[in-house]
Image (cartoon, rainbow, N blue to C red):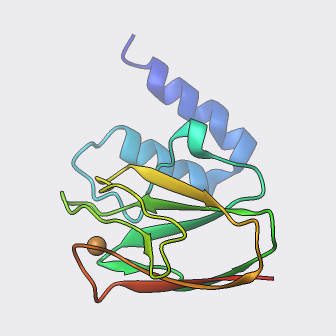
């Protein structure tokens, strides 16, 4: 029974290649390993065509994204500790609740423009969405 996980990894090797697989198997079998930038987006938040802005190390990265009218930006808190963040438009076009690590917030941009935003608990965290 314990070998089933490894069997799965071996199967994936063929599908995605040795490099990606080695990392995947390692983390899967070593829960104490650092996440190494792994940031999971909840399945129901994955909007096709949307742009994901990870929040990590007290920063939106990238700080500026360019999208087209009708696209969605999804922010996801990728902090590896318990730090919560928000994404809050300076012009009040959107305002997320506090996002704990692993949580995401999406906003659909239906108008062109330049939208600056910040994080409420950490006003030094700023970002910009340019909608063309
Ligand atoms: Cu913050």
Residue 118 horizontal side relative to residue 92, left or right: left
Residue 11 horizontal side relative to residue 58, left or right: right
Q: Position of residue 79 (x, y in %)?
A: 30, 63
View extreme (front): residue = 92
Ligand 1 quarter of the rendering: bottom left
Residue 130 horizontal side relative to residue 53, left or right: right
View extreme (top): residue = 1
Q: Residue at x 22, y 73 (%)?
A: 121
- The N terminus lies in quadrant: top left
Which quadrant of the figure has residue 98?
bottom left
Which quadrant of the figure has residue 124?
bottom left
Q: Nearer the viewer, residue 130 or 47?
A: 130
Q: Residue at x 37, y 80 (%)?
A: 59
Q: Residue at x 57, y 38 (%)?
A: 43
Q: Position of residue 113 (x, y in %)?
A: 71, 85
Number of numbered discs visible in the structure rendering = 0
Above or below 53: residue 4: above
- The C terminus lies in quadrant: bottom right
Q: Nearer the viewer, residue 55 or 87?
A: 87
Q: Residue at x 43, y 63 (%)?
A: 95
Above or below 84: residue 10: above
Residue 129 horizontal side relative to residue 54, left or right: right
């Amino acid at each position: 029974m314990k070998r089933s996980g490894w069997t799965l990894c071996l199967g994936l090797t063929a599908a995605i290649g040795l490099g990606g697989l080695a990392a995947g198997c390692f983390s899967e079998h070593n829960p104490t390993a650092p996440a190494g930038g792994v940031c999971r987006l909840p399945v129901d938040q994955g909007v096709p065509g949307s742009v994901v802005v990870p929040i990590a190390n007290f920063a939106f990265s990238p700080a500026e994204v360019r999208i087209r009218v009708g696209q969605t930006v999804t922010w996801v808190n990728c902090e590896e500790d318990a730090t919560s963040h928000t994404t809050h438009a300076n012009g009040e076009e959107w305002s997320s609740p506090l996002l704990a690590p692993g949580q995401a917030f999406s906003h659909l941009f239906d108008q062109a423009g330049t939208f600056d935003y910040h994080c409420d608990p950490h006003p030094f965290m700023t970002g910009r969405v340019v909608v063309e």
